Amino acid sequence: MFNPFNRRDYQNRYTDRPKPKTPDYRDAPKITSNLSHTLEYVRDTAGESDDFIVRRTVIKDKEAVIVYYQTVADQRQVETVIEAIQDHQFPRISNKELPFYLMRQVIPLGNAIFMDNLWEIREALSRGVLVLLVDGLNVALTMGERKLPHRAVEPPLVESSTRGPQVAFIENVDVNVGMMRWALTGDTLTVKELMVGYRSRTRVAVLYEHDVANPNLVETAIKRIQAVHVDKLTGSATLEQRIVDNHWTLFPLTRSTTRVDNCVKEVGQGKVLIFVDGDPSALLVPGTVIDFFQTMEDDQHNWIEATLVRWLRMISFVLAFYLPALYIAFVDFNPELMPHNLTLAIAQSREGVPFNAATEVIIMQIVMEIIREATLRMPKVMGQTIGIVGGLVLGQAAVEASLVSNILIVIIALTAIAIFVLPSYEFATTLRILMWANILGASFFGFYGVMIVVILIMFHAASLKSFGISYLEPISGEHWRDFFLDGFIRFPIPLLDKRASHYHNQEDTRSADYTDPVAHPLLEVPKRRSKS
Amino acid sequence: MNKMVKRWLTTGLSATLLVFLPGCWDYEAINTRSAVIGLGIDPAPDDPKKFEVTIQFPVLGNASASEKGSTPGDTSSYQNLSIEAESLSDAFRNLQRKMDREVDVAELRAIVVSETLSGELMDSAVGQLMRIPRINRLSYLLVTPERAREILATNVAEKAPMDFVDKSFKVRQQGYVIRRELWQYWRDTTQVGVLPVIPIVKTEQTSENAGEDTLAFGGVEVYQNNKSLFSLSQQETFYLNLLTGKVREMSFDIPIGDSTTALTDVRAKSRLRCYKQGTSIILVDHVQVNGSLGKINDPSPKPMPPTQVTQLESEVSKYLTEELTATVQKLQQSKTDVVGFGRYYLQLHPEDEQKLKQSWGDMFAHAKLNITVHVQISSKGVLI
């Protein structure tokens, strides 16, 4: 069978680099039955911190301690555990049976486990777990869960929509996985949890439908995440840049989103979803170019409306990509190719402008980029000021001061808005940079330059792969069905009964409509009465 | 060296070399050129072997335009420059001395030639124009009995005169002139079996202001070997347009009895044929004319019965058949086939090409005519 994922096994390309200097768990000693030894070890490592707490108690005449970080552990859980231990009437049992007895009869928390490696215990401590050490036992009991405040689930800030669920992911990976489980309540949704980072020990959750997603894709994703050897992982973006196929490309090779419904749709399509703890934006792999032109919102509308909106996105992509470059090519190189009246109009509006069209466009585009970046970073209350300064002062005044022509202002404004018709912010950023490449090409060689830039970009995009899938899929022509049915056109939902084939899923059928249900033999009614 | 590094290096070097490939030859910014919108060609007053070339170009960004709010594409302020020269390119080079921008004929809209231009000068002018690679071959070609220089200097309707020509040639009405673009004239001069025509432009006094002139179009000038032969009047040009089926949005009067009837919204289609029957050549033209009633004999506003309409149709058909036949006969007398019957003849008899080249005029003059006109009155108007 055709298998795109096994062509090249992923391997860490930077094997020669020095690794971060963190102690190996293999060097850490095992726990001994001598409590003071263990405590000494813990004190020398975790005990350096001021928020480290050692709570002493007694279990069946034996010295016992509960150690935890008070800043991450749940204080109420500590109290419950201590209360349970102190209230319990311990029977006469041997040291060998004590750990199991504690686990079975005493500890009131659900997630208690045994641990005997001190390195693991330290790691668990910093995760916010309570560790119970008892003198004479060569095993520790860890229990509890960290209690950290996180914000409530809110509507998405960036990807807003008019209809459909208005929930977005938050910074807590457990809540995010919970939201996915809430939306996809079948046990086929599989969650794999990985730890990344020597120091940060960031939790990364990988979600997929195990009977739909291509197992090679899942394996590739998990292997690549496991191959990440860093000391800290700060967010999904840094993980994304380490696991994609090409580190140098401009194009986003994964789709990142904060909307739950987007993820539900794509995981149902057979994609793999990756959450990084502490980051609300989730990664969907593989990401191909068509993903950046559609949103879940398309499914909320009538098929004609959804199709037209998709076309609008493509038109604005073309406008944003070509318009400033074509202006330069027309004005500076081949004005005779324009309609007569437009030539005159542009020539007239450029009368008195001291720069050539290329300089003019570059100046105004830089101004536009400055306004755009300033609006992003500026406190929200000052957003209005930027609007007035940007729109009035720079637009109107630049024309009146004869710095630029007023037709150029129209082009710059249209480009600036058209870029953000695309639903994906990452792709919009890419488009901004591609537009610059096009502008430079046009300023040097006119139409010839525009063509060269376009050919280079197409060449590069066609050579890209995202997790084994060609980046231009399904436009490349091999999977034309995906392109027409739910790509260029969004056909009515009942017709979309097959999953996109370019993901090479295990299971292709998405839905079946029972237009002719099987009738009950006793209730069967003759369908047509004979004429006789 | 790593294979991939090598590949990237090669790509990078080739991309850098591209910088040296085109140089700066194609950098021609819009504001460094002056778009010549009109060109007038006269014989020089003193030397009959020289041209007097007049160019017309809009003056952009003057103070008055910006005060008005500078409507884009406004050509109300323009400048004409004239010079005498042996060739057009020489004229352009010399005119450049008087201008602060490059002469650019890529935006040319209309070319006006003088009727008095001799055959050799016209021949040389058309040849030179067609040879300029950048020239706009879709620019209109006009002929004037006056001096082309004066036509270019006529003030019309807040526009440059040649802009006016360009715009008024794009209206829907077709009948009194035959619009000719430069390439069409060139095509007709080089083709066998047809003679080129050029529409005539004149200055006419507007009735309101005695001093102000306007441009008026009407009739065509027939050319043979780039030499002006004779001109057809406005009415004859209309019949010529009917023969070729190029009439749109016209109206015309038909004398019936002692009064006139008028048809409006007239459009025509025609089917031309030309073939050999025995020793004689037959010219066939079936013209289908469609129109609605404009004016009728009976001034009272009462509905017209269908029989009268049919009668009217046959009367108009008869009248037009006579007129069209007369027009073709006039063309036959001067041995000029401007309708293009020869082209159809050549399609049927390609073996006669040499004969056609030498003596199509004579063959045309002795051909038999079969011209039929079928008029259909599609609307009697709404009388309530």
Image: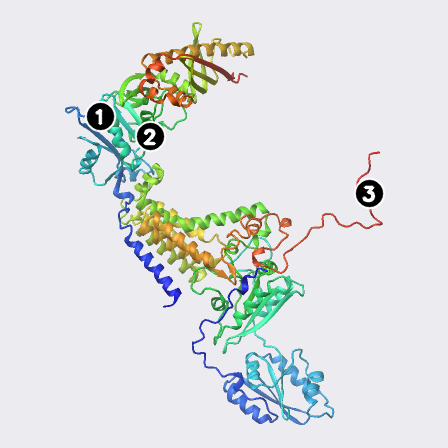
Amino acid residing under circle 1: Leu
Amino acid residing under circle 3: Pro
Q: A345 or B176: which is nearer to us?
A: B176
Q: Do marks 2 and 3 share a subunit?
A: no
Task: Using the numbered discs, state the Cα–Cα distance from disc 2 to disc 1 in whole angstroms.
Answer: 18 Å
**Residue at mark 1: chain:** B
Q: Position of residue A512 (x, y in %)?
A: 68, 52
Q: Residue furthest left?
A: B46
Q: Do marks 2 and 1 share a subunit?
A: yes
Placement of the C terminus of chain B among the 4 image quadrants: top right
Work out whether B79 lies above or below B342: below
Task: Using the numbered discs, state the Cα–Cα distance from disc 1 to disc 3 in whole angstroms.
Answer: 94 Å
Q: Can residue B264 be seen by looking at this rendering?
A: yes
Q: Position of residue A322 (x, y in %)?
A: 40, 49
Q: Residue furthest front?
A: B351
List the residue tagged with mark 1: B121
Label 2 crowd (10 A; few <14 / some 14-19 / many >=20):
some
Q: Position of residue A160 (x, y in %)?
A: 53, 56
List the residue tagged with mark 2: B183
Q: Residue B273, which numbered label? A: none
Q: A205 or A379: which is nearer to us?
A: A205
CB atoms of marks 1 and 3 within 8 Å: no
Picture quarter containing residue A262?
Answer: bottom right
Q: Do marks 1 and 3 share a subunit?
A: no
Which residue is depicted at the point 35% across and 30% down? B167
CB atoms of marks 2 and 3 within 8 Å: no
Nearest to viewer (mark 1 / mark 3): 1
Work out whether A346 lies above or below B367: below
Amino acid residing under circle 2: Trp
**Residue at mark 3: chain:** A
Q: Residue A526, which numbered label? A: 3
